Image (spheres, rainbow, N blue to C red):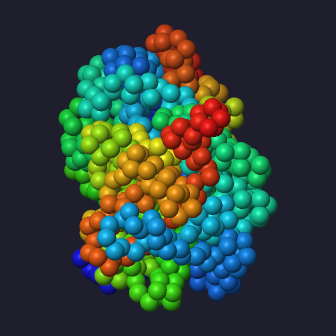
Amino acid sequence: MISQTSAVLKANKAAGNGNLIGYFPAGYPTLDESIEASIAMCQNGVDVLELGVPYSDPVMDGIVIQEATMTALENGFKLKQTFDAVREITAKVDTPVLVMTYWNPVIQYGIENFARDLAAAGGAGLITPDLIPDEAAEWLEISDKYELDRVFLGTPSSSPERMKTACDLSRGFVYAVSTMGITGARAEVDANARKVVAKVREASETANTAVGIGISTADQVVEVNSYSDGAIVGSAFVRAYADGGVEALVAKTVELSARLKN
Amino acid sequence: MSEQNLRSHVGPYFGEFGGRFVPESLIAALDELEATYNTAKADPAFAIELAELHRTYTGRPSIITEAKRFAEHCGNDVRVFLKREDLNHTGSHKINNVIGQALLTKRMGKTRIIAETGAGQHGVASATAAALFGLECVVYMGEVDTERQALNVARMKLLGAEVIPVKTGSRTLKDAINEALRDWVANVENTHYLLGTVAGPHPFPTMVRDFHSVIGTEARQQMLDEFGFLPTALAACVGGGSNAIGLFHAFLDDADVKMFGYEAAGDGMDTPRHAATLNYGRPGVLHGARSYMLQDEDGQTMESHSISAGLDYPGVGPEHSWLKDLGRVEYRGISDAEAMDALRLLSRTEGIIPAIETSHALAGVIKLGKELPAGSSVLINLSGRGDKDMETAGKYFGLLDAAKAGN
Ligand SMILES: Cc1ncc(COP(=O)(O)O)c(C=O)c1O
């Protein structure tokens, strides 16, 4: 099968452009506003959308995303609405939509039910921050059946064997975790990020890899694209939206993507 | 159910439970911990060092006290024995695991430990070990718990630990664990996460159990040596489940010994305000392992409720989920009110003030004793002492007002 996400990442790179992967939480601050915000990101320079599922115990997330997803839950976000959001976003834009979710909501919905409904809504696949390949047997099978992308994480501390597994089993791209830590803006994106990408390249000749965690400026986005297949930005978008709504979010999207396209 | 080989079982999986549901960033640290633990376990020098620390520092073996006057309230002709973990240094069973993991921290060459705490007992034990071994120590504690266990916050600070109140989510134990995991992801190179119960990703459930199994190993031998029989039943309170598994483990293959775990039922088992995970939860993934947990239909973790900070947790260790499904252990709920009555009863009948957590097991035995045949005996894990709970108990029983009024 051909991954829609992979096709977009490779096409942009082949054309000499970079890739910007943008995160936004579904249901933040409300379902309708999150759909509007996501579409605006896709229309203004985001190449792949990472739609977050709000979850009560987000251990990989820093305070900005924690607060946004808590707001979504307080405002009544329900898991099923993820599929409504994906459907409405993909009806308006061609951007691949990956859903970023902690694993328990998927288990409770039923892995197969989740895959089926995501595929039916036009979703591209899942990014699973707390599901390692070792525990993913059922997901591997079901994501094949529904032709969904599955993005596993590679980190500075991953052994070469584990990195190879992440590369072999990921589809779409491998999420290169830039630094040992949680989401949130950092003044400098670690030298570690280059090392992680080098480890991915060593483990696989074909896997795409995008760098995430801590990226918030246009310089960082450009720099990361110089040695990887894309930059993943989350907290900076959420913060922009929190500070100035869709207008500020669009401005941030334009700012971060402007130097990627020639 | 297979009766004969439950004791030899180790993780990562306990039936369908357990595993490692954590970000990839932590896998290398978990692998390192597992390897270090396995090497230590095979090294006689480690066992000797640990035993010596327990003898000269923790105060092991802990004694068994027969609670004769308390037993009069537990049905007809039932004998009640208390395994006195409250007499350990720092006042609870938590130190057994902490000393073990602190030794492993040294072996890994790490210089900083972090811990979560609910009641503060695990935090105090961790701060104590950090002082003893010269480690930096940071303790995460839900803001609600820093208020209801203020005395333990002061103890941790006096011992040189930094206590960080966690203000996210329900501001209790669950959120303290989230925050500790976030710290660990960022600082894993020099930091060991000294997890305080038998939950979390492999190898924690197996390793923490092993460090606490000294409770049951001692108690089993003491029962045989001092009384000449094994108890009819064991009883322990269950938060994450460390003191319970510590008592149960040595007896798991004694088919005639029944086992009862008591969860916090908060306002009552017929109300939604409880922490009775094994009674009312369903399997899911929380804090790195698959186990029973309290959750809504979307898999969002639900808030638990209990007067006891140490039992106020919507998850439970995976081995307990397995033992429940096997039918080897029966788990029941005890309300706040029942636990507080038992706390007062043990104080007045035996001169022993138990922790509120522990009081759930005591309340359970008051009821259980009435179901057991005459001549039965129950061994309770007296997991901790109640000093830390005097503020809560004082308010609950109106003792502080009375003191002010000069009564
Ligand atoms: C005295 C005491 N007993 C029991 C517990 C509950 O933990 P666990 O179920 O892991 O034994 C605590 C936790 O803080 C405690 O302090």
Asked if residue A151 can be seen in this view, the reply is no
Along the line of sight, the residue nearer the viewer: B284 or B338: B338
Which residue is painted at 54% across and 76% down in the image? B64
Residue B234 sits in quarter: bottom left
Along the line of sight, the residue nearer the viewer: B73 or A117: B73
Along the line of sight, the residue nearer the viewer: B309 or B18: B309
Q: Is B372 placed left or right of B405 in the picture?
A: left
Which residue is painted at 25% across and 32% down in the image? A80
Residue B306 sits in quarter: top left
Q: Is A166 placed left or right of B373 in the picture?
A: right
Which residue is painted at 77% across and 64% down in the image? B132
**Vertical relation: B271 (above or below) B1:** above
Total of numbered circles in the picture?
Answer: 0
Asked if residue B67 can be seen in this view, the reply is yes
Q: Is A40 placed left or right of B298 in the picture?
A: right
**Vertical relation: B166 (above or below) B233:** above
**Residue B160, horizontal then vertical, whole percent:** 77, 50
**Vertical relation: A36 (above or below) B397:** above
**Residue A4, horizontal then vertical, whole percent:** 33, 37
Residue B74 sits in quarter: bottom left
**Residue B37, horizontal then vertical, whole percent:** 59, 73
Along the line of sight, the residue nearer the viewer: A195 or B108: B108
**Vertical relation: B98 (above or below) B281:** below
Which residue is painted at 24% across and 76% down in the image? B1
**Residue A240, horizontal then vertical, whole percent:** 54, 18
